[in-house]
Amino acid sequence: MLSTLEPGLSGARLVADVAGALDLYRDPLFWWFPVGASLVSVAAFALFAAPLTWLAMVDHPALRRYRIQPRRARDDDARRIILPSLRLWAINNALQLALIVLAWPLLRLTSVHAGPPPPAWIVGAQVLLFVYLHDLRATAQSIHAR
């Protein structure tokens, strides 16, 4: 990677170091892992949030008993609430993408690969472990809150 700037460091060495660092971004896994995962995240949230936002704005009488908000949506809510929320969502996604692109050289050093997926039992065990640890943390937090 980039070497420290020492006295007498030639320009050719610096160019070679920068070219080596940029080679990491030419890796096909770069487009699948950080960029692809970010795009999937944005699309999944939009596909989930858009219909629910539309349902809240339509305020169908059959769905009113499921309403979480204390009041009915007003006409200016789109301008006052939804548009600023969309702007902040876009900024958040842009920052997240920028940070994950900058962190790619470190992420590439992990065991992320595009090879065959692990067996199903390993994935299932990891999900169960995650759920258990998450519940354990939530239980500990509720005990401390008392």
Image (cartoon, rainbow, N blue to C red):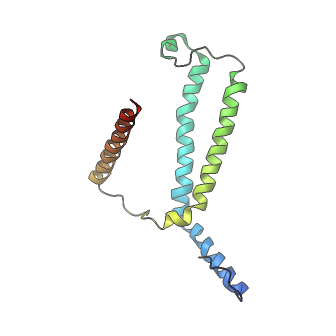
Residue 125 locus on image (x, y percent): 28, 49
Q: Look at 72% across and 20% down and name the residue there.
A: 76
Q: Nearer the viewer, residue 75 or 129?
A: 129
Q: Is residue 107 above or below residue 79?
A: below
Residue at the outermost left position:
121
Residue 131 locus on image (x, y percent): 34, 42
Relative side of 97 to 130, left or right: right
Q: Look at 52% across and 65% down and name the residue there.
A: 106
Residue 14 locus on image (x, y percent): 68, 81
Q: Nearer the viewer, residue 133 or 54?
A: 133
Q: Nearer the viewer, residue 121 or 105?
A: 105
Q: Choose top left, top right, bottom left or bottom right for residue 75.
A: top right
Q: Is residue 89 above or below residue 122?
A: above
Residue 81 locus on image (x, y percent): 67, 27
Q: Quadrant of the N terminus?
A: bottom right
Q: Quadrant of the C terminus?
A: top left
Residue at the outermost top position:
61
Q: Look at 56% across and 21% down and name the residue there.
A: 55
Q: Look at 55% across and 28% down and name the residue there.
A: 51
Q: Nearer the viewer, residue 124 or 146?
A: 146
Q: How many marks?
A: 0
